[in-house]
Image: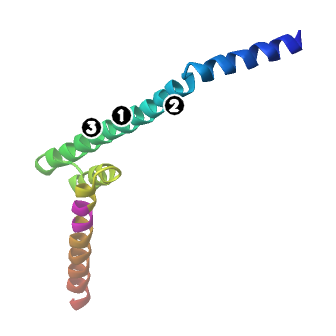
Amino acid sequence: MFVGLILLVLVGVILALNFGAWKRINKLKELAKLTYKHLRRVVIFVVGTSTVLAGIVMIILPGPAILVIPAGLAILALEFVWARVLLAKFKNKAKVITNNVQQLFEKK
């Protein structure tokens, strides 16, 4: 019985090789990877943009906009170069402001 199962599997593999099933399987794997990458990019865009927009709303309404906007940019920076550049500018500006505030308190 076990030998018959092995022979059946071998015949199936031989037939699959003859009909190009492996090529189709590889194409399906590539398509699945491509679909996953696109889905990941869309999810990151939606979540990051929503977070940044919530932070912008928090500038007017009470809320921690200074924390939420960089968090949204960090989410977007996972996938988009322009968000990385914007986040780097934000970090540099925050360092300058922090140094200025420290110097202001040191003088007094």
| Residue 80 or residue 95, whichever sits in front | 80
Q: Secondary structure at mark 3?
A: helix
1 and 2 marks in contact (CB < 8 Å): no
Q: Which mark is residue 46?
A: 3
Dividing the image into 4 quarters, which one contains the C terminus?
bottom left
Please state if 3 lies on the left or on the right of 41 as rendered: right
3 and 1 marks in contact (CB < 8 Å): no
Note whether 87 is above or below 93 in the view shown. above
Note whether 2 is above or below 73 in the view shown. above
- The reply to whether the magenta stretch includes residue 105 is no
Q: Nearer the viewer, mark 3 or mark 1?
A: 1
Residue pointed to by mark 2: 26
> Picture quarter containing residue 100?
bottom left
Please state if 37 lies on the left or on the right of 24 as rendered: left
Q: How many marks?
A: 3
Note whether 27 is above or below 97 in the view shown. above
- Label 3 vs 1, first from the N-terminus: 1
Which stretch is magenta?
85-89
The residue at 23%/40% (across/down) is 50
Q: How many neighbours does mark 1 have within 10 angstroms: few (below 14), some (14-19), or many (20 or more)? A: few
| Residue 86 or residue 105, whichever sits in front | 86
- Say which amino acid is labelled 3: Val
Dividing the image into 4 quarters, which one contains the N terminus?
top right
- Label 2 vs 3, first from the N-terminus: 2
CA separation in Å, label 1 and label 2: 20 Å
Residue pointed to by mark 1: 39
Q: Decide whether the magenta segment is chiefly helix, strand or loop.
A: helix
The residue at 34%/36% (across/down) is 38
CA separation in Å, label 3 and label 1: 11 Å
Please state if 29 lies on the left or on the right of 64 as rendered: right
